[in-house]
Amino acid sequence: MNRTKLDVPYFSQWESPEMTLPVLAEGATALHRDIRWRNSGAETPEEYAHWAVNICGMACLKMILAARGEDHPILTLAKACTAYGGYVVNEVDASIKGLIYAPFATFVRERFGLAADVRTQVQTESIPEILSAHRFFIASVSSAIRWPEREPPGKGGHLVLVTAADEEHVRFHNPSGHDRASQTDVTLPLATFDRFFANRGIAVSF
């Protein structure tokens, strides 16, 4: 691997990383019990729960910014990104659509001075090449990647932060992993990662 472990701080999309299994079992309402909800920047537990299930991409951004020494509440990032069109909130039912890649890329360029390049039709074996030119790759994968031994129901729908890769393995932080082994510096063979990877994402550099 071209990076040492633990050089990128880990953040879950929940303020309490152990909330993943309750969320899977009960849905977003489980997050009303998250005693750390205020750290998100939300005004109420309900606002926190509503947004938290949609902001794996903001967790990836929070980790990127933390790697250069910055600390931003995750909902503050999400709301700022929404102003750029990175999320769209339905006026009728308040459902949230996103992350939308192109506006997100504009957001991080203008607000944080990051280089961001949307990538589509990415072959898994080309991820090491992407990381040779960019510090990070936010990859679209199935959220089932937390259980790599299982067959996923599909590809995409969730975002992880890829921090290193070589010709055999990929390493990433997963904002919705259910335990430390599935959250931080997860290392999988490229062939395993490929079963979950939707062949798209965003390359990001400081």
Image (spheres, rainbow, N blue to C red):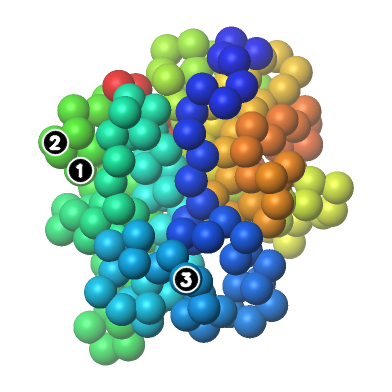
Query: Would you say 121 lies left or right of 65 here?
Result: right
Residue 140 lies, in percent from the top left, at 53, 45
For label 3, count other residues whose C-alpha is less than 10 Å away and answer few (under 14), some (14-19) or many (20+): few
Asked if 198 appears above or below 9 in the picture, the reply is below
Residue placed most toward the observer, 162 or 3: 3
> Which residue position is annotated with label 1?
107
Residue placed most toward the observer, 25 or 105: 25
Q: Quarter holding the C terminus? A: top left
Type of the residue with mark 2: Glu
Q: Residue at x 68, y 67 (%)?
A: 21
Circles 1, 2 touching at the beta carbon (< 8 Å)? yes
Query: Would you say 95 lies left or right of 156 here?
Result: left
> Which residue position is annotated with label 2?
110
Residue lying at the far right of the rendered structure: 149
Nearer the observer: mark 1 or 3; the answer is 3
Query: On residue 35, which mark appears?
Result: 3
Residue placed most toward the observer, 37 or 173: 37
